Amino acid sequence: MLKEEAIWLADWIYRMPVKDVFPLCNIGSSTLEYRAKKQPFIDELIFKPARDKGLPVIHVDLKSARGVDIVGDISNPELIRKLSQYNFKSILCANILEHVKSPGELCSSLTSIIPNGSYLMVTVPYKYPYHPDPIDNMFRPTPLELADLFINTKTVKGEIVIGRSFIDELREEPMRIIKWLARLAMPYYQPMNWLSNVAIITYLFTNFKVSCLISQKLR
């Protein structure tokens, strides 16, 4: 997640009435370590304010680790049925659609989880290099193209959020330069991840961009 993306999401979440957003379901949440340490702005901006106020957030991911409340594959109908029982007021699905075989199917599943009137907060890279986890289908939609995948919803807000370039990120974390260069020197180790490190070269001086969408399920 880009920091600018987290700011965009947090701004919408905490401008809304609490009853319209919480309980919130975070799909593809990753672990607490990732949210709070690897990318600490995710927890600081999006989840800590909710936690401090005692607002319910359920984190869902394939990984069984600290910070994951429900472990499961979102493509599994049993998990969809389980999540639909929580009566979530909103779902956050950030940077997941580019990592699944069928983005459209996942969008249908997400919409089916929430009751009418609830919200979907979805982000997908728009200008971002190849990055498999475990795959990258290279889905890079505009907000309008993303909105078209959510049937029976209306767009509340859609925007292409502009982040920093890769060189900007490296300037903030000098040690990351060493790690990146070392990784480039080892193409034989995890070749697909090596490719993502090569692909990012084209973004040294090009700003990352992400499509951000808020949709509401129609009544």
Image: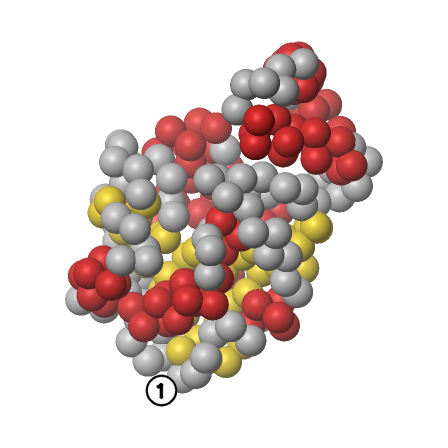
- Name which residue lies at 62% across and 70% down: 145
Which corner quadrant of the image does residue 169 belong to? top right
Q: Quadrant of the N terminus?
A: top right
Q: In the rendered image, which residue does mark 1 sit on? A: 219
Q: Residues within 10 Å of mark 1 (few under 14, many from 20)?
A: few
Question: 173 or 44, which is in the foreground?
Answer: 173
Q: Is residue 12 visible?
A: yes
Q: Quadrant of the C terminus?
A: bottom left
Q: Please provide percent x and percent y for residue 77.
A: 24, 63
Question: 164 or 140, which is in the foreground?
Answer: 140
Q: Please provide percent x and percent y for residue 198.
A: 70, 29
Q: Please provide percent x and percent y for residue 70.
A: 23, 47
Which corner quadrant of the image does residue 64 belong to? top left
**Residue type pointed to by label 1:** Arg
- Name which residue lies at 42% across and 36% down: 35
Q: Is residue 84 left or right of residue 38?
A: left
Q: Is residue 211 left or right of residue 29?
A: right
- Name which residue lies at 67% across and 45% down: 128
- 18, above or below 117, in the image: above
Q: Please provide percent x and percent y for residue 195.
A: 64, 31
